[in-house]
Image (cartoon, grey):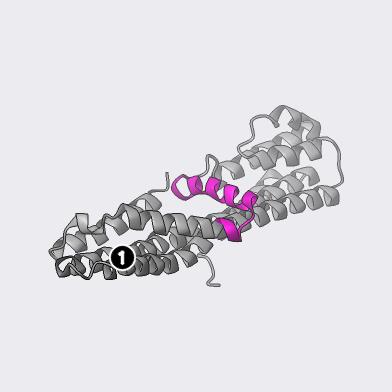
């Protein structure tokens, strides 16, 4: 589990609710189902309108990646590639067929299958690069639904506030309800700005970071498999792969 994501989400909501309580306000004042329906429904609807359904559904599938770490990790993959490089150097690449079903990453299994089948290194590299590029393009398009929702939510929140004010103005005959009505109306704005800056945009940034790390791991897999096919000494293979582990720890560059 990605502890930072869980703690960050909880801390954000606790800070807002806690601030409301410390200011003497009631928690019930910012719990408005109607405003929630307007903001969430409107934001999701606008996002679906601006996004192909395949990308939208794929984006929903990415939510799990925000809160959970991948089953395999770079260190585990590096260790596996070094092990199979020793097997290939000692017994030949055909001996790798016994290791195709216990790989820590599906891409390794596909790549090693190409090696066992005797494909040319240049062809294997082209196949892997194509698959990596396609997967990255799909995930980049999918994570943009969170950026889109983060852009729509504040505006939908303002729309909800205006609707609430209209409702309040229709009840001017009862002055005692005007203040309460205006307060309720602005809850929609809180939901819009809050959901954008506490949920949608942070999720998009986290997924961008994880997509970048996934790309580095895939590059490491391609480098390792091609080195295995070339018959390079396992110690040299390990040194090559360590470069990717160091690259993985580098902070993301600002766009």
Left or right of 129? Residue 58 is left
Q: Is residue 53 magenta?
A: yes
Quadrant of the rendered image containing residue 47: bottom right
Q: Secondary structure at mark 1?
A: helix
Q: 100 or 151: nearer the eye? A: 151
In this picture, which residue range is highlighted in magenta? 48-69
Q: Is residue 162 magenta?
A: no
Q: 100 or 19: nearer the eye? A: 19
Left or right of 158? Residue 24 is left
Q: Quadrant of the C terminus?
A: bottom right
Q: Quadrant of the N terminus?
A: top left
Left or right of 250? Residue 231 is right
Secondary structure that dominates the magenta span:
helix
Above-or-below relation of 187 to 123: below
Query: Residue 169: percent from the left, percent from the top?
Result: 28, 71
Q: Residue at x 36, y 55 (%)?
A: 36
Residue on which the image places disc 1: 167
Q: Residue at x 49, y 55 (%)?
A: 44
């Amino acid at each position: 589990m990605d502890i930072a994501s869980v703690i960050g989400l909880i801390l954000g909501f606790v800070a807002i609710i806690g601030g409301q309580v410390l200011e003497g306000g009631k928690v019930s004042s910012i719990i408005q189902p109607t405003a929630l329906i307007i903001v969430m429904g409107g934001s999701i609807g606008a996002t679906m309108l601006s996004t192909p359904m395949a990308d939208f559904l794929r984006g929903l599938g990415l939510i799990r990646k925000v809160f959970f770490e991948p089953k395999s990790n770079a260190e585990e993959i590096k260790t596996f590639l070094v092990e199979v490089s020793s097997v290939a150097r000692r017994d030949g690449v055909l001996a790798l067929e016994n290791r195709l079903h216990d790989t820590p990453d599906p891409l390794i299994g596909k790549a090693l299958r190409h090696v066992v089948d005797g494909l040319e290194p240049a062809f294997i590299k082209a196949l892997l690069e194509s698959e990596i590029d396609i997967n990255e393009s799909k995930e980049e398009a999918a994570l943009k639904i969170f950026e889109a929702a983060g852009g729509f939510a504040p505006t939908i929140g303002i729309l909800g506030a205006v609707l609430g004010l209209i409702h309040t103005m229709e009840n001017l005959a009862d002055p005692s309800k005007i203040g309460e009505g205006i307060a309720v109306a602005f809850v929609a704005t809180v939901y819009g700005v809050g959901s954008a800056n506490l949920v949608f945009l942070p999720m998009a940034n986290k997924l961008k970071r994880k997509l970048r790390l996934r790309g580095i791991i895939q590059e490491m897999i391609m480098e390792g498999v091609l080195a295995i096919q070339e018959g390079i000494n396992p110690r040299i293979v390990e040194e090559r792969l360590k470069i990717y582990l160091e690259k993985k720890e580098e902070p993301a560059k600002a766009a």
